[in-house]
Structures are given as structure tokens and as C-alpha cells.
Image: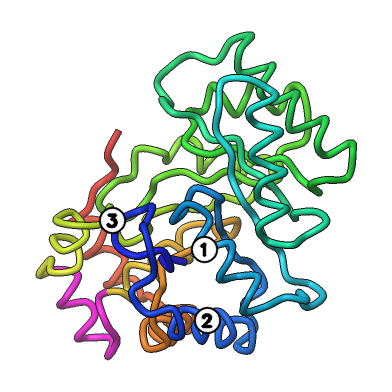
Amino acid sequence: MQLAGDGFFGPRSRDRDEALQVLRAAVAAGVDHIDTAQFYGAGTVNELIREALYPYPDGLAIVSKVAGRGGAELREGIEDNLATLGAGRLAAVNLRMMDPSEPPGPGFDAQLAALVRAREEGLIDGVGLSNISRRHLLRATAQTQIVCVQNLFNLADQRSRDVLAECEARDIVFVPFCPLGLPGEERRRLLADPVLAAVAVRLGVTPVQVALAWLLDLAPNILLIPGTRTRAHLAENLAAADVRLDAVARADLTGRFPLTR
């Protein structure tokens, strides 16, 4: 949820009361997966989640991410998330790579081992990966169970198709971040695209809903985390689950947004 403000990291919510209402409305509507991180708004988002939802309802999966070079730094990141959220454990924590083009090696193995230790100690239920290449995924799955992968992926940027395919083959959840494009000009350009707009008009929905429905239609292992900071936007996003793309819509979108590598 994009509760910290503009971009990725905030710094602060524009409307704290609305952010709290968004969180409560999401859970009331049946949302059972919340993506967060301690570095979103320097802890602000985790604080909002705790204020809005603690004590957490049964079945709510809170998933975070950590980044760092060493195991101690990653462990500290996990503990910071737990403390700010007021949680005893997290459903999963994603190990975020800073540069997915960097080949995985012993350093990656050591980072992964730190999350495995956290799982073994009961701090997290599952180990995930974020911003990775297929090479990272193959190396990681050779060492431990991976429950989810979170990569940049949307209509305009499909460079992680190979990672998505590998996740689908292995029954690993694939979570596209920035499912409507990177914040700023890229997102505005995507949502203003005339082909996307025409498909939306024909189906009687919004361009946002078509872009999200395209992702859900792509593979059964996709789980969405669109950034949301108003209840109106939340309702629009949730309604995307009911949008059904027909063959004409799929063909139009494929022709306009071909596979990129």
C-alpha cells in the first residue's frame, strides 16, 4: 500500500486518518495480504498498520522485505519490522537485491542463510526474494524453499517474464511491484495509453482495472499489491478482480505491449 506518500518511500502520509481508514477498509473487504517494509516512510507505514489493525485478525499475512550486505544487518531489519508492527512473526520476508543483474554468488548465499535462520527461529514463516533474476531464483531454490518472489512487472515492463514462468512452474507466488508502472511519468504514460483506454471503455471499466486484470489473467500464481492510499482507489483496485478480459482485449493489449526483454 502506498501509504507513506509519493514514490516508494514517503516520507509521510498526506492524510493519516485516511491511511488508517484504507487499511481497515481493505481488511473488512477481505484483503488478507499486506505488503510493507520498515524503510517505507522510515517506519511510518508499519506504524500505520499497527495502529489500524492491531491486534491482527487471524489469517492476515503481513509480508515485509529487507536489504543489506551482511547477515547481521538483515537480522536487524527483520527485528525492526517486528518491533514497529508489534508482531511476533511475519508471514514472509523478502530478501531484496539491489542489482538484479549482479550474478548471485557466496554473498547471496550468506544473505539467504540469514533469512533461513530467522525462519528456523520462528521470526518469519517463509523466505521470499525481491528484485531478482532467474539465476537468483534457481540458486535460492537449490538451497531452501522460496514462497514468493516480488519483481517489477506490468504491461509496460515485462522483463521478468522468465522469472514469472519459473515461479509458475515451481508453484511460487509471483508478486508484481509497481503493477501500474513506476510512479511518475511512466505510470501516467501507461494509464493514458489510447489502446488501454479503448479496452477499458469497451469493457465498461477503468484503465487501472484493465491493467490489473491483465496481470491476474496472465498466470494463476500472481498476487497483486497495487499502491493504495485512498478508499476510492482501494475500491477501484479491488473491483479489478471481477474484470474478465475477452480474446479481443487480450489481443489488443498484446499487440500494444509486446513482450520486452
Q: Nearer the viewer, mark 3 or mark 2?
A: 2
Query: How far is mark 3 from mark 2, CA to CA?
Result: 25 Å
Q: Secondary structure at mark 1?
A: helix
Mark 1 crowd level (few <14, some 14–19, many ≥20, 10 Å Cα): many
What's under tag 2, amino acid-wise?
A: Leu
Tell me what residue is drawn at x 42 percent, y 61 percent.
215
Residue 57 is inside the magenta segment = no
Q: Secondary structure at mark 3?
A: loop
Relative placement, left or right, of 20 versus 160 is: right
What's under tag 3, amino acid-wise?
A: Gly
Tell me what residue is drawn at x 69 percent, y 25 percent.
72
Displayed quadrant of residue 183: bottom left
The label number, if any, that marks residue 57 in the structure image: none
Which of disc 1 and disc 3 is earlier in sequence? Answer: 1
65 vs 46, nearest the viewer: 46
193 vs 34, nearest the viewer: 34
Task: Determine which residue is flagged by label 1.
Answer: 45
**Residue 145 at what x, y percent from top left?**
77, 35
Query: How far is mark 3 from mark 1, CA to CA?
Result: 21 Å
Q: Where does the magenta region start and end?
A: 195-207
Magenta stretch secondary structure, dominant: helix
**Residue 6 at what x, y percent from top left?**
29, 62
Q: Are marks 3 and 1 in contact (CB under 8 Å)?
A: no
Which of disc 2 and disc 3 is earlier in sequence? Answer: 2
What's under tag 1, amino acid-wise?
A: Val
**Residue 169 at what x, y percent from top left?**
64, 41
The label number, if any, that marks residue 181 in the structure image: 3
Query: How far is mark 2 from mark 1, CA to CA?
Result: 10 Å
Task: Determine which residue is flagged by label 2.
Answer: 20
Tell me what residue is drawn at x 55 percent, y 88 percent.
25
Residue furthest right in the image? 121
